[in-house]
Amino acid sequence: MSPKIEFGRSEAQLLASTWWIFLVAGIVSLVFGAIILSVDWGVESLAAFIGTLFIIQGVAWLITRPLDGGDRTTNVVAGLLGAAAGIALLVWPDAGLYTLAAFVGIWIVLSGAVHVVGAIVNRHAPHWWIVLVLGLIEIPIGMWALRRPGLTLAVIITLTGVWAIVTGVWQCLIAFELRNLPRRLRPA
């Protein structure tokens, strides 16, 4: 059995230094989600737009520390996978609706799984349950996309737009929580 990791002021200060990255990524995700839901897309243009969103989200994962204050390996791997999926969609935008649905579904499921596992393993971290809630929202959304091979473009647009907005709201909330975290951990 591994020893319990304590989450202290030094970890909180390290996380707090990156709060603005979460805020920028959240705002970008909110804007992308709103644009995705409001534009009349074709498969190729939607794939390119979602590819750009995946790259931005992947870079955000790459440059931020895990919210539990632990090892960065998971963030680096998730960031590289997200950026690679985004690049693949940009390079291959005419792959078709099935491929686009698979990229979106797999990314959302993997993101949700990382959030759920990270939250459960790191229950000692402040506000771990917020990360758990996001993961529990992402997994069913991604699974639904993956089990519907006959998705229409309208469904992919709605699914991706809603996911981008939920993720953006979460990132903005986390940003402000991180910014205030060291202050809350100061001794009374």
Image (cartoon, grey):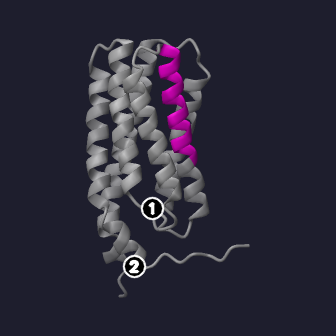
Mark 2 and mark 1: Cα distance apart in space: 13 Å
Helix, strand or loop status at disc 2: helix
Magenta: predominant secondary structure element?
A: helix
Q: Quadrant of the C terminus?
A: bottom left
The residue that disc 2 covers is 10
Q: Is residue 62 above or below residue 126?
A: above
Where's residue 57, x and y in %? 37, 42
Q: What amino acid type is highlighted by mark number 1?
A: Leu
- In this view, the residue farthest toward the bottom is 188
Q: Quadrant of the N terminus?
A: bottom right
Q: Which mark is residue 67?
A: 1
Query: Label for residue 120?
Result: none
Q: Is 33 on the left or on the right of 88, as rendered?
A: left
Residue 12 location (% of width, % of height): 39, 73
Q: What stretch of residues is rendered in magenta?
A: 97-113
Q: Is residue 124 left or right of residue 65?
A: right
Does 103 appear in magenta? yes
Answer yes or no: is residue 136 visible. Answer: no
Disc 1: CA contacts within 10 A as few (<14), some (14-19) or many (>=20): many
- Rendered image quadrant of residue 29: top left
> Which residue shows up at 60% across the image and 59% down it?
120
Q: Nearer the viewer, residue 107 or 154?
A: 107
